[in-house]
Image (cartoon, rainbow, N blue to C red):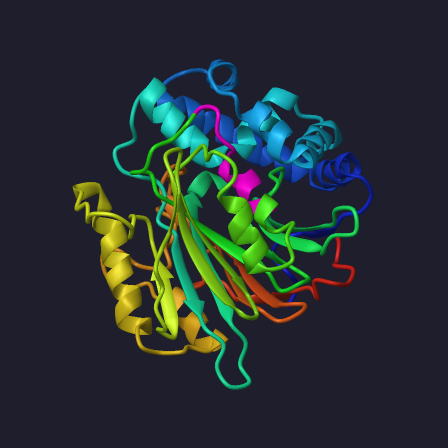
Amino acid sequence: MALSFPTLHLSGTAREQGRQHGEALREAIARVREQWRASLRTRFGVPPDAFIEAFLAETNFVDAIRRWCPAQLEEIEGIAEGSGRSLPETLAFQFMDEEWWFGASRYQPPPSPANHCSVIASRARNDRPSILAQNMDLRAYLDGGQAVISTARDGGPRTTVMTICGMIGLCGANAAGLAVVVNTLWQLPSAVDGLPVACVMRGILEHRDAAAASAWIRRPRHASGQSYVIGDPSGFASFEASAAAVDEVPWEKAPSYVHTNHPLCGKPRVKRAEENSRSRYQTLCDLITGKSPTAEEIKSTLSSSAGPHPISVRPTPNDPISTMTFASIVMELKRPPDVQMTGGPPCSNPYFQIGPLNARAAVA
């Protein structure tokens, strides 16, 4: 069975890798961008170019990227050049989590949070490696834009990330066995001068182990509230980051760990808008708590589509701004890791093997 999404093995300078990405996926990028632009008008009631202009003018994300991860800025510039899309549009498209809170505060809030991501981590046991996995839930207009890019930086470990065509990444792993998954925490403070989520994620994967990545994640100011679960063959660390703080979530010696879209640190905050997140969290706890699940058991859990707040979310017909499971990823944290991914909700799409991460990948 052929892959249902493109995979790209990129090489050269950061700018060259961006150009390769943009050129190879030019048609898909154009299609996804036009659907995204239409959604900006629908969601925020303004022309897309006006939104993009205000978004970039009223934030300082580019300065934060230039300070903390300048190679990523060069890669984004390369994507714009290779795809033939404007740099302002390409920049704004990277800042997905930031777009949500900026648009809600500047124009109009959505009827409910768009993000419904679900994370599972499983400790190593006997001869079985640690596993880090996620359902990435996004707006339905992004469906068809699933892709995998494999990048390398100046002799660092090759990094393979799940992404949207034309974006630097959503989550992933590197050849040293380090992996990261993310969940939006829209309740936490944001900052117009912070480092955007996609750049934090890629910055984490430039390190060789969870200890180094855990030290680095505390350094920048964060643009958006976000959960980052970082893992390597020796263990895990979980952080809830925001403009105000980076809190490490205690994880005792339980064999597994789950996270959805409400903060676990600090005082419990029960908000009506958290109903979906808390329901999925309880479902994951019921299915996983006290167990050391295998990759197959995790895939089965992430494929659960039962109940009013399913883990695997099918798109709503004829509603491009509804939420769906854009992709699912399961990473066994070896050196190099084994990575499997679906294009779309795992309840109705197969997992494909991605990699190996230290070798040349197929190019769509």
Q: Nearer the viewer, residue 342 or 88?
A: 88
Write down the quadrant of residue 303 in the picture: bottom left
Residue ID at (66%, 31%): 73
**Range shown magenta:** 192-202
User: Does 193 appear in magenta?
Assistant: yes
Residue ID at (48%, 13%): 50
- Residue 146 seen: no
Q: Is residue 191 above or below residue 314?
A: above
Position of the N terminus by quadrant: bottom right
Q: Position of residue 45 (x, y in %)?
A: 36, 18
Q: Is residue 122 left or right of residue 33?
A: left
Q: Is residue 196 above or below residue 280?
A: above
Q: Is residue 94 left or right of residue 314?
A: right
- Residue 57 seen: yes
User: Does 181 appear in magenta?
Assistant: no
Q: Nearer the viewer, residue 4 or 277?
A: 277
Residue ID at (66%, 69%): 335
Q: Position of residue 358 (x, y in %)?
A: 74, 63
Q: Is residue 26 above or below residue 152?
A: above
Q: Position of residue 337 (x, y in %)?
A: 63, 68
